[in-house]
Image: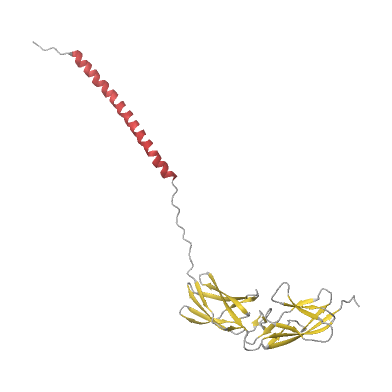
Amino acid sequence: MTPRTNTTGVSILTKLAVNLNKIWPLFFSAALVQASAAGATNMLPQIAAATSAPSPAPQVIAPKSNDHLLVTIPPNIQLATPFDLKVVVSGAGLAVLTVYQKDELGHHYAAGQVIDITHIAGNTASGKVTPMLLGSVTFTVEGVFKDGDVEKEDVTVPVSIPSIAPKVFHGEDSPSGGISLTLGGNVDGAALQPIAYYGTIPDEIDDWGHAHPVAVHLDGRVQYSIIPSNGAPVVRLQQDPHEPSDVDVVALNPGTATLEARFGSAVDYIKVSVERPQNIK
């Protein structure tokens, strides 16, 4: 007997296998897409965080100068008497050294002294400086280095009256040597401007090679008095209202008066003439 083959069952199984082969790729692709989408969604916060975080700023280090000054001024220095200024230098090397002066009354020595370096030992340079002001004087030492850097240091020291008298002392810096005032006029008072000249201060050389003596201004450092005379007082002395350290002479009555000016051992006498206004007889 020949066995019978169930062609109906085989046909059904065959069709099922064919359909599974068609459906399975579509199912797998959908699952893959869904998984990829889920993974991408999970990655979004990380990507957003990475893109939104600021990148670290580069470190900028400000250059620091290695050029420095350490200034030493000896004690007991005197007006118009040169002293040795010592400067310890570190850095690129010193090109120019200039010294400026200011006293506690606010007076400045107008010109800075460019120091001629006379001695160098290691990193210490020294040169001569001449004090041009009295009292508590601040010396501002300015160093210009070869790399273009500029460094300053202030040193405040007392400056005393020198033991030697000045070559020339004027209680009033007037071409005529005296003062003329007009009673009740526009010029009924004057601020006294004392000066002195010392032989220890080198002359100033102008652009044409001419030498000029350098005056030391003594505003606020001179003692004034009026020489007594008969009759009504001609002038009086008062503190300058604008410069309290200075002294004014003010007209009181027509006539002449003599002022005495003292600076240390130096003495000067100043003649003051007071006239009536021309329209008053």
Which residue of the protein is positioned furthest toward the right in this rendering?
281
Query: Residue 207 appears at what percent x and percent y?
Result: 66, 79
Q: Quadrant of residue 186?
A: bottom right
Colour mode of the rendering: secondary structure
At x 40%, y 38%, the residue is 44
Q: Nearer the viewer, residue 125 or 229?
A: 229
At x 32%, y 29%, the residue is 31
Describe residue 73's horizontal placement relative to residue 57 as left or right: right
Query: Residue 199 appears at what percent x and percent y?
Result: 64, 87
Quarter placement of the C terminus: bottom right
Describe residue 26's horizontal placement relative to residue 269 as left or right: left
Query: Residue 126 appears at what percent x and percent y?
Result: 52, 81
Quarter placement of the N terminus: top left
Q: Nearer the viewer, residue 85 or 76?
A: 76
Vertical side of 72 occupied by 38: above or below: above
Q: Nearer the viewer, residue 206 or 69?
A: 69
Which residue of the protein is positioned furthest toward the left in this rendering?
1
Query: Residue 87 appears at what percent x and percent y?
Result: 51, 77
At x 78%, y 79%, the residue is 236
Describe residue 226's horizontal placement relative to residue 54 as left or right: right
Count the marks.
Answer: 0
Q: Quadrant of residue 256?
A: bottom right
